[in-house]
Image (cartoon, rainbow, N blue to C red):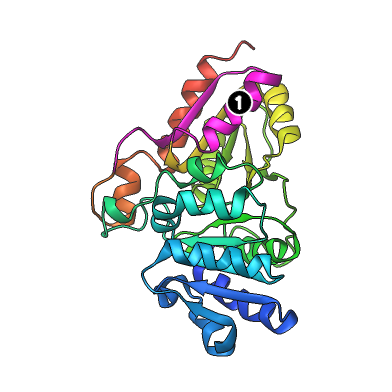
Amino acid sequence: MPGQEVSLRETYGKTLVELGKENSDIVVLDADLSRSTMTCFFAREFPNRFFDCGIAEQNMVGIAAGLAASGKIPFASTFAVFVLGRCFDQIRMSIAQPGFNVKLVATHCGISVGEDGASHQSIEDLSLVGSLPGFTVIVPADAIETAQAVRVAAATRGPFYIRLPRPKLPLVYNEDYRFNLGKAVTMRSGKRATIMAIGTMVTAAVEAANNLAREGIDCRVLNMPTLKPVDEVSVIKAATETGAIVTAEEHLEHGGLGSIIARVVARHRPVPMEMVAIKDTYAQSGKPAELLQRYGLTAKDIEQAVREVIKRKEW
């Protein structure tokens, strides 16, 4: 039911098992973190199709590329900070340039990884992977969307990056939800401004819109699960119909959702924008909720951004 908190990592691991039963070409790799990324479910079910590469993430990426070149469908997982931070060159050379059918599913993204501190808080990964031609980038908002996104990735040829958080997230969808690759999802209608959010910030965006509605500020909310290719049609429609946009993401302001939306808006329908994101800094160690508050990633921060952007509207 919506509101129930469910682990996206665990959903990913269980979905892999389902896919493994359906398709013998599915193989899974990990870098000594399978109990955290939850690929351990697949390892127990299919030990001959699971490869623990140890603390050697670059090797894991190379092996995944080789398996893809051999006709397999590899899912490779580790923490987001490791896969993009340590393996960018290997991903670029061995996956992106040849366009191999590798699915990178990274967990423990953003600052909500918490007490592990800045060394484990991946806040640059979307900027890095988004710069690679040919990659599809997905940031699910809940467990239901995660399961469907993983299935779509398995069925769609080409390199994918799927970004998952450490904490459980509230369900925002019912079981009848259907994920459509490359399409935004309207979570709430509205005409005064549009809030566009990804991942952990979708729930906060809906909460913010509900709070603003009590002030008479009617906001549209779009979940943008496919960050690349982004749904340009929905972005242009929102800009045209509401005249102001706020983006919300658990990532640096540079190179993530805000940057992508701003590029579309600037080209097709310039309107005022505000970006709720991490502002050119690394975060401290702390509890996830405290970090989100300290670095301006809450519903209240989104509400204030909406008030500010409305002041700049031309109509």
Q: Extreme top residue here?
A: 314
Horizontal and vertical percent position of residue 31: 42, 70
Helix, strand or loop at disc 1? helix
Q: Residue furthest left?
A: 285
Q: Position of residue 32 (x, y in %)?
A: 39, 74
In the picture provided, is 1 more to the left or to the right than 58? right
Above-or-below relation of 155 to 19? above
Q: Is residue 74 left or right of residue 258?
A: right
Quadrant where the C terminus is found in the figure: top right
The residue sitting at 49% across, 35% down in the picture is: 255
Residue 279 is covered by the magenta coloring: yes
User: Depth check: 294 or 214 in front?
Assistant: 294
Identity of the residue drawn at 69% across and 38% down = 189
Q: Is residue 33 visible?
A: yes
Count all numbered tags in the image, as a single digit.
1
Q: Is residue 152 left or right of residue 118?
A: right
As displayed, is residue 51 above or below residue 58? below
Expressed as whole percent of the image width and height from the top left, the position of residue 67 reads: 62, 70
Residue at horizontal 60 percent and vertical 31 percent from the top: 261
Residue 168 visible in the displayed image: no
Q: Identity of the amino acid at label 1?
A: Arg
Magenta range is 253-282
Q: Give the residue at x 47% y 49%.
A: 89
